[in-house]
Image: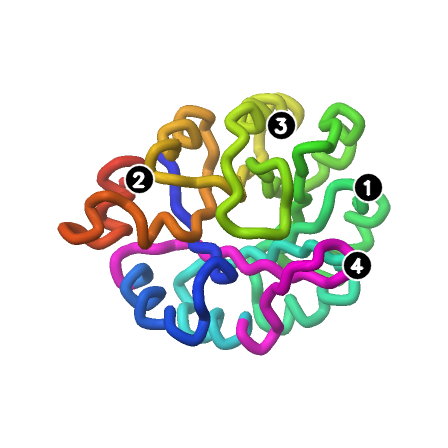
């Protein structure tokens, strides 16, 4: 089973609310929220007010906050207040000591973002101490429409060998013509963006129905 998560930043927030309503009504269980600052990446992310609004509007959806920021600690108290379930931050900023400290500030699950250039075996102790991984499946972060690097999906097996309990969220490059690769790699949740507007059966069936028939329920 491969679940789908909608990247909110990949949508036009001024126009997409009905689209999100339709996804949720038809079975969307996960949403992916990007938080960014100009220290880590030059792209824009969400603000807390938008995240809070979405979490309150869709109480049955599980939200993960993907923090591409210089210091996630500054955000943890607010994430607790708005009741986000999962928070991830860059692997290279992590340490076992930080994770222990962060768990006193945040009640949900903690994870790390693994980028294409990260040497996984240099971070075994950290990977053993997180609840989930946001696995970047593109070579460069901070944009939309970047192509999948399928070789990065082989990391799912490596990560689960280190920590069999890991929940793996893939991020980047998901398209109709490669979604089967995420399924075969045993990703738990695949984050997508434009696929909801480009899948071939768009005129015949709602996206979540189409997705779940192929990869889900």
Q: CA distance from mark 4 to mark 2?
A: 37 Å
**Residue in view at x 62 percent, y 22 percent:** 158
Q: Is residue 77 left or right of residue 61?
A: right
Question: How many neighbours does mark 1 have within 10 angstroms: few (below 14), some (14-19), or many (20 or more)?
Answer: some
Q: Secondary structure at mark 2?
A: loop
Q: Position of residue 49 (x, y in %)?
A: 58, 78
Residue mark closest to the camera, 4 vs 2: 4
Instruction: Depth check: give the residue in front, 164 or 184.
Output: 184
Mark 3 or mark 1, earlier in chain: 1
**Residue in view at x 55 percent, y 60 percent:** 33
Residue designated by label 4: 39
Residue designated by label 1: 96
Q: CA distance from mark 2 to mark 3?
A: 22 Å
Q: Quadrant of the N terminus?
A: top left
Q: Is residue 66 left or right of residue 128?
A: left
Residue designated by label 2: 216
Q: CA distance from mark 1 to mark 2?
A: 34 Å
Q: Secondary structure at mark 3?
A: helix
Q: Which mark is residue 36?
A: none
Residue interval drawn in magenta: 25-50
Q: Quadrant of the C terminus?
A: top left
Q: Quick check: 204 above or below 215?
A: below
Question: How many neighbours does mark 4 have within 10 angstroms: few (below 14), some (14-19), or many (20 or more)?
Answer: few
């Amino acid at each position: 089973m491969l679940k789908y998560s909608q990247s909110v930043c990949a949508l036009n927030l001024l126009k997409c609310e009905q689209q999100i309503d339709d996804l949720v009504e038809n079975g969307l269980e996960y949403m992916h929220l990007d938080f960014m600052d100009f220290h880590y990446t030059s792209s824009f992310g969400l603000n807390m007010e938008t995240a809070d609004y979405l979490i309150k509007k869709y109480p049955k959806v599980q939200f993960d906050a993907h923090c591409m920021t210089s210091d996630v600690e500054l955000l943890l108290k607010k994430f607790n207040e708005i009741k986000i379930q999962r928070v991830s931050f860059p692997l290279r900023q992590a340490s076992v000591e930080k994770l222990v400290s962060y768990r006193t500030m945040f009640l949900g699950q903690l994870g790390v973002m693994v980028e294409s250039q990260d040497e996984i075996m240099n971070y075994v102790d950290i990977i053993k101490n997180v609840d989930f991984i946001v696995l970047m499946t593109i070579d460069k972060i901070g944009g939309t429409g970047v192509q999948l690097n399928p070789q990065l999906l082989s990391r799912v097996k490596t990560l689960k060998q280190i920590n069999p309990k890991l929940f793996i969220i893939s991020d980047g490059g998901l398209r109709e013509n490669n979604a089967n690769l995420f399924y075969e790699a045993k990703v738990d949740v695949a984050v997508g963006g434009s696929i909801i507007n480009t899948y071939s059966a768009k005129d015949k069936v709602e996206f979540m129905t189409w997705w779940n028939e192929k990869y889900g329920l």
